[in-house]
Amino acid sequence: MVVGVSPTGEFHIIAPTFVPAGGRLHIIAEAVKGDVRSRLSSYDLVLRDAPLPAPSITSSSMAVGSLTQVSGTAMPGARVRVSIRVDGADDYRAPVEVMANMGGTWDLTLAEPLSYGTHIITAAQGGISGKADSAASSLNAYVRPAAPRIISPADGSWIAANQLPEAITGTAVPGATVELQVDADPTGMGETVALPLRTQADAAGNWSIPMSALIVGQHRIVAVQAVGLLPSDIALSAFHVTAAEVGPETPTLPVLPGTAGPDSGHKPVTVGNPGTGGVPVPVGNPGTGDGSLVLSGTLGTSSATDGVSATGTRTGGALAETGATDVGLLTGGGAALLVAGAAALIYGNRRRAVSDS
C-alpha cells in the first residue's frame, strides 16, 4: 500500500474494520523519495472489536392519549433490548427483546400501553458476531391527554343574545383540570381579553363553567385540559351572538261583563225597539222617521228596560259614520253597550251599502 505524506510529514492509513485472527495487526512502513529509501519501521497493534453503535429510537417523543408502540433502527439482524421506566416508578420494567429486520428497523408493540405522564425508554442492541453489545440510547416520551371537547356553545353556531346558554359545557378526562378563556388569542401572540376560567371534570368526565353576558358579534372559546403537569392541545369553539329575539305576542281578548255564557249568569245585550221585545232594529229604519237607534235589554246585572238612545246624523235616510257617539256607560254594562254600538254601526254600513246599490 502506498500513501502520500503531507507537507508536515504525516501519513494516514485506514485500519481494518474487523479484528484479524489472533487480534494482532503487524504494520511495516518505509519512506521513499526518488531513489532514496528509508529504513523499515514495524508496528504491532493489538486490536479489539468496537462495540455496536447504540440503536436509534425513532418514535415521537409526544403521544396523545396513550403510547402503544416503540420503533427504531439498528444493525440488520441485531437483537434490540427495550426497557421502560414508567412515570413515577423507581425501577424499569423488565426488558423486552425484539429483532431488527434486514432493512435495519425494529418495532415493539407494548403489552401494557403507556398512559399519561413522562416515561423513559431505553434501547441497546447486540447479537452481532465479533461485535460487543452497544450502549443504550434513550428517549423521554410524553403522553398527554387529547384536547377537551366543548359541547355548548357549539363551534359555528349562531345564538341570539337572550338565548345564550347559562353555562359553557363539555367533556374531558375524568378528574382533569380544565382551563378556558373567552375571546382569547389561541396563538398566544395577541392580547387576552378575559382571565382564564378553571374547573375540574367530574367522575364522568363532564365539566361546566358559568357563561357571562356577551355582546353581539363573533366570539371564541379556547379550552385545554391537564392531567398532572401535561397539558393537552387546545379545543376551539367559534360562534356568533346575534341580536336578542322577540317572539310574537299572542293577543288576549278581554272577557266583557254582560257577555253570554252557560255559566255567566248574564243575558246578552240586545239592540232593538222596546216595543218589539228585543227584536233587532236596523240603523236608520225608515219606519222611525228620525234614524234614531234605541237600545234595550239586560246590561250586566243592571236592567235597561228604559231605552237608551244613540243618535247620529241622518244622510240620505241612513246613519253616517259618526253613529253611536252618544251612548252612555251604565254601571255594570258600559263595555257591553260599546260592543253593541259597534255592532250596530257595522250593521248600518252593510244596510247602507245595500240601499245605495
Image (tube, rainbow, N blue to C red):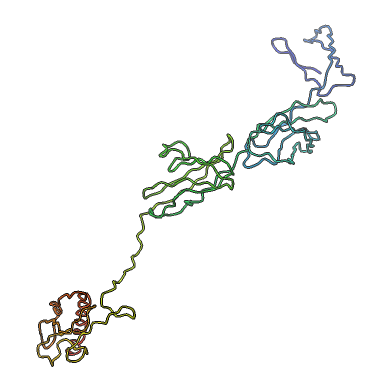
- Where residue 98 sits, quadrant-wise, is top right
Q: Where is residue 118 in the image (x, y as percent from the top left)?
A: 64, 33
Point out the image quarter for the N terminus.
Answer: top right
Residue at 38 percent of width and 47 percent of height: 214
Give the vertical position of 168 relative to 247 (above or below): above
Point out the image quarter for the C terminus.
Answer: bottom left
Front-most of 206 and 332?
Answer: 332
- Looking at the image, residue 200 sits to the left or right of residue 270; the answer is right
Front-most of 136 and 269?
Answer: 269
Front-most of 260 and 239?
Answer: 260
Residue at 20 percent of width and 89 percent of height: 354
Front-most of 285 and 148?
Answer: 285
Q: Position of residue 27 (x, y in %)?
A: 84, 14
Q: Where is residue 142 in the image (x, y as percent from the top left)?
A: 63, 35
Give the vertical position of 34 relative to 189 (above or below): above
- Looking at the image, residue 61 sits to the left or right of residue 54; the answer is left
Give the vertical position of 149 relative to 84 (above or below): below
Q: Which residue lies furthest to the bottom in this view?
A: 287
The tally of labels here is: 0
- Where residue 265 sits, quadrant-wise, is bottom left
Q: Position of residue 260 (x, y in %)?
A: 29, 80
Residue at 79 percent of width and 22 percent of height: 50
